[in-house]
Each structure stands twice: as structure tokens, then as C-alpha cells.
Image: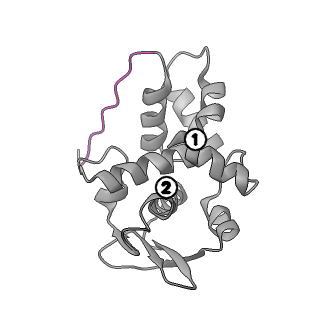
Amino acid sequence: IAKDAKQLLEDIDLYSVPVNPVSVCEKLGIVYDEQPYNGFDGTLIVAPRNQLIGVSSKIVEQSRKNFTCAHELGHYQYDIATNQTFKCTKEDTGYGSQRRDEKEIRANEFASELLMPEEFFLKEIRNKEPSWALIESLTEKFETSLQATASRFINLTHHTCWLVVVKNL
């Protein structure tokens, strides 16, 4: 997945950070649209002459919209041969989601690689101790959410780390 994401960004001359997934769509000829969708956060529709990635305008955080768009680009990269339409919920696009659907997991991994390319991310964390300040600085540099950035850090660092997410306190 890392090689595929890097190759895509190199092919369309966008291999730098931060990666703007809307620009990726434009370079690939995919229409990007935001609407107040009900029942899903992101969609990919592939028709014979048009491709569309839609992201819910109800999503408040731009970093979350970026991840959702990149997730749909993952489906475009890997899954359009078997399915021309995807409607993904927050659970599908949620990084670290409990969902175990292989296509959704792969789309999330692709989104992570696309938005936080391993080569650039490793340069930022090399020889640095884990800290919340480091994670916050990475979210700004890569324009990603705290949760996605922390998860990426945990996956790429040599330090033993845990991410604990608590909801509804």
C-alpha cells in the first residue's frame, strides 16, 4: 500500500506534504463534491465517463474530510473493478475502527499512507521521543486528525506506545 500511494503521488506530481486529497482527485479527473449527505460520510461513484468522490459537509473538521476523501481514493485505487459505488460511514472511515471489512481496512491504510507518506513521516519522527506536543505538530504539518496522526506514529515509531481514545466522558 505504501508503494502504491507513493507511486500515485509521484505520477501526478504531488509527492510532498501536506497532501491535499482534493488536488489528487483533480489530477485523476475525479469530481470532488461536498453535500450534507445522510447515512454516510463519503462516497465513491464510478460511471463510464465520470467519477465522483463525495464527502459530507456535515463533517466539521477539515482533517476528517481529508481522511474521508483519501479513504474513497483508496477504494478508487483498489476496489473499482469489483464495485462501482461505495457509501462509507464514519465507522468505515474511522481510523482504528472496530470494523473488520477487508476493503474498508485497506482504504483506511491507503488514506493514512496517502496523507502521511512514510518517507516524510519518518523524517519528522526520527530520533524524537514520543510526546503529545510531537503528535500535535505532526497534525499541523500533515493536516490530519490527532487520532490518525497518533495511530500513524504508533505504527512507524520504534518506541513502545499506546493510544487510548475515550469518548463521552
- Dot 2 corresponds to which residue? 67
**Which of 160/15 is in front?**
15
Magenta stretch, residue numbers: 159-167
Location of residue 72 with respect to 101 vertically, above or below = below
Spatial distance from mark 1 to mark 2, Cα to Cα? 19 Å
The chief SS type of the magenta part is: loop
Q: Identify the image quadrant of the C terminus.
A: top left
- Dot 1 corresponds to which residue? 3
Label 1 or label 2, whichever comes before in sequence order? 1
**Residue 141 at x, y percent in the picture:** 65, 41
Q: Is residue 26 magenta?
A: no
For label 2, the crowd category at 10 Å Cα-Cα, with few meaning under 14, some 14 to 19 and many 20 or more, is: many
The residue under the point 42% across, 35% down is 151
**What label sits on residue 54 in the rendered view?**
none
For label 1, the crowd category at 10 Å Cα-Cα, with few meaning under 14, some 14 to 19 and many 20 or more, is: few
- Color theme of the render: one colour
Amino acid identity at mark 2: Phe
**Which of 32/51 is in front?**
51
Element at label 1: helix
**Residue 4 at x, y percent in the picture:** 56, 47
**Residue 34 at x, y percent in the picture:** 52, 76
Element at label 2: helix
The residue under the point 49% across, 45% down is 112
